[in-house]
Every structure is written in structure tokens, then in C-alpha cells.
Image (spheres, rainbow, N blue to C red):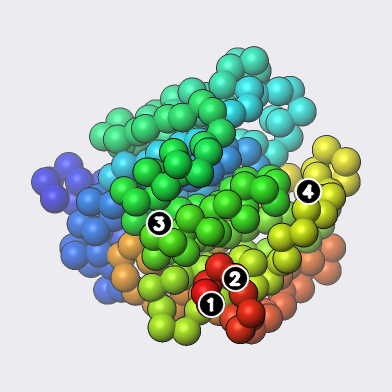
């Protein structure tokens, strides 16, 4: 790190869990964020601020007026723009040294495999089961940690799937890939700051994985009910018949 970086990241370097070595790991890291909506917004902003060296941003949507209630990385002037371009401007405004790779189309399996093979952590901020199941399969294949979050109405959840661990579970151990219909925020609504809470936890877990400190949420599902502000933790176990992580 140079003197400017030491000053910028001094509040993190002061933490014994991070120190110089941990901050250097962050600066040398590459993170993939899928989705630049309500969850991807705080994730991208905080990872850029924390000193992640390179972000690959993926989203095939444009900014709409209804997004601005919760997708804090975008502004009124961005309505009609591609979300990845709007998000790129926002994170660059925070950290001009950040390297960016932006993708404006949804990645098919081959393209996703190419990207996942290059990154240290994948952060799932998507809003559909098809993407989540595909991300799960590819990250398990390439043994890349996956930080998963979701929020709807007044409820949110976050966990980590880490195939590098000897005993681990995956997304498909928790949810069966049967092509069920899913609810969306546009149909059911969502509390704006709740997405910030879940996205911020995803960012924390990403930093922990890269800087190599603490205990990740691997094997634990953290749930929040914002109505009562109660947190619950559920222990996750691998499904011995899972075709993805136990095959």
C-alpha cells in the first residue's frame, strides 16, 4: 500500500482483524456482484469504499423511477440508463482507483463460468430463482464462496455457501429447484432500509472472506423480521441427496 491508501483505509487497518495484510488482500481481490438493485446497491457501494480492488458488475435492467425507493446506488438523473452504468459512476465517485468490469446482459452458464473462475467471491443480489440456482451450481463447481441475500416485504435473510469447507451445504440443499413461481417486490412490496441491512451484511461477509478473519455465515442462515426487529439463526446442514454439492 502507498501513503494515500494507508490514509484512506486507516480506520480498517487499525482493526487487528484486518491490519495491513488484510487490507492488502482486499486491494488485491476481485468480486462479482450479480444484480445492482436493492441488495446490490449497498453491496457495491460498501465494497468500493472498503477497498476491493476490482468489481465485476452484472445487471441487464435499466433504472426505473420505482427503483429509486430502495436502489440507492441510482439517482433521478439515471432513470432510463443501464443499471450497471449508473452503478459504475456511483462506485467510481467513491473510489476512483477501483477497477471495474461491467456487463449489461444476463450471463449464460458459459459466460458465468468464465467470470467465476477469475473472482475470489460471488455476491448474489439477484431477484429470481433461475439465476440463484445457476450461481449455486457454478460456484460449487469452481469452489468459490457465494454470499447470498434476499428480502421481501418486512423479512430478509442472508447466508454464505462456501464449497472450500470440508463439510458444507449449498443453496439447493435449502431450496429445491422445481421451477416454482416466486413472489417479487413489485408484487408484494419491500421496506427500503431492510435491503440496506441485508446488503450491508453481505458486504461484511465478503470482506471477512477476503481479509480472512472471523467466522462467516457458512452453515448458518440469518433471518430478520423488521416488523418486530427480531433476528433468528438457523443451522444449515447439507442434504445428503443434493445433486449439486454432494455429488
> What number is the disc on residue 29?
none
Q: Which residue is mark 3?
A: 121
Q: Return the disc, 2 or 3, that comes first in the chain's sequence.
A: 3
Q: Of marks 1 and 4, which one's residue comes earlier in the chain?
A: 4
Q: CA distance from mark 1 to mark 2?
A: 6 Å
Q: Is mark 4 in CB contact (under 8 Å) with mark 2?
A: no
**Quick check: 217 above or below 125?**
below
Q: For the residues marked 4 and 2, what is the alpha-carbon distance in whole angstroms? A: 35 Å
Provide the residue designation for mark 2: 243
Disc nearest the viewer among 1 and 4: 1
Asked whether the residues under the numbered discs 1 and 2 touch, taking CB atoms below 8 Å apart as contact, a structural biologist would say yes
Mark 4 vs mark 2: in front: 2
In depth, the one of 182 and 2 nearer the eye is 182
Q: Is the C-beta separation of discs 1 and 4 under 8 Å? A: no
User: SS at mark 1?
Assistant: loop
Residue 128: percent from the left, percent from the top? 70, 46
10 w.r.t. 140: above or below = above
x and y, in percent, of residue 233 in the image = 67, 79
Element at label 3:
strand
Instruction: Tell me how far mark 3 sits from mark 1, CA to CA.
Output: 21 Å
Nearest-to-viewer mark from 2 and 3: 2
Q: Which residue is mark 4?
A: 191
Gap between marks 3 and 4 measured at Cα: 27 Å
According to the picture, the residue beneath numbered tag 1 turns out to be 246
Give the mark, 4 or 2, whose residue is nearer the N terminus.
Answer: 4
Q: Secondary structure at mark 4?
A: loop
Q: The residue tagged with tag 2: helix, strand or loop?
A: loop
Residue with the most extreme right position: 187
Q: CA distance from mark 2 to mark 3?
A: 22 Å
- If you read the primary sequence from the N terminus, does the residue marked by circle 3 or circle 1 appear first? 3
Discs 3, 4 touching: Cβ within 8 Å: no
> Residue visible at 28% across and 52% down?
29
Amino acid at each position: 500500500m502507498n501513503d494515500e491508501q494507508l490514509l484512506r483505509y486507516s480506520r480498517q487497518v487499525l482493526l487487528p482483524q484486518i491490519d495491513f495484510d488484510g487490507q492488502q488482500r482486499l486491494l488485491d481481490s476481485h468480486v462479482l456482484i450479480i444484480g445492482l438493485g436493492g441488495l446490490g446497491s449497498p453491496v457495491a457501494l460498501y465494497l468500493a469504499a472498503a477497498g476491493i480492488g476490482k468489481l465485476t458488475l452484472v445487471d441487464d435492467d435499466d433504472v426505473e423511477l420505482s427503483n429509486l425507493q430502495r436502489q440507492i446506488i441510482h439517482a433521478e438523473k439515471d432513470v432510463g440508463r443501464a443499471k450497471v452504468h449508473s452503478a459504475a459512476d456511483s462506485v467510481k465517485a467513491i473510489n476512483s482507483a477501483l477497477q471495474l468490469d461491467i456487463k449489461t446482459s444476463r450471463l449464460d452458464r458459459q459466460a458465468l463460468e468464465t467470470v467465476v473462475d477469475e473472482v475470489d467471491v460471488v455476491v448474489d443480489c439477484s431477484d429470481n430463482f433461475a439465476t440463484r440456482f445457476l450461481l449455486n451450481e457454478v460456484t460449487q463447481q469452481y469452489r468459490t464462496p457465494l454470499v447470498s441475500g434476499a428480502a421481501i416485504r418486512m423479512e430478509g435473510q442472508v447466508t454464505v455457501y462456501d464449497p472450500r469447507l470440508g463439510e458444507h451445504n449449498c443453496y439447493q440443499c435449502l431450496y429445491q429447484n422445481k421451477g416454482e413461481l416466486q413472489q417479487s417486490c413489485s408484487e408484494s412490496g419491500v421496506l427500503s432500509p431492510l435491503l440496506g441491512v441485508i446488503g450491508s451484511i453481505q458486504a461484511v461477509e465478503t470482506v471477512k472472506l477476503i481479509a480472512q478473519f472471523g467466522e462467516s455465515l457458512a452453515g448458518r442462515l440469518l433471518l430478520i423480521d423488521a416488523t418486530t426487529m427480531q433476528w433468528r439463526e438457523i443451522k444449515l446442514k447439507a442434504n445428503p441427496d443434493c445433486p449439486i454439492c454432494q455429488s
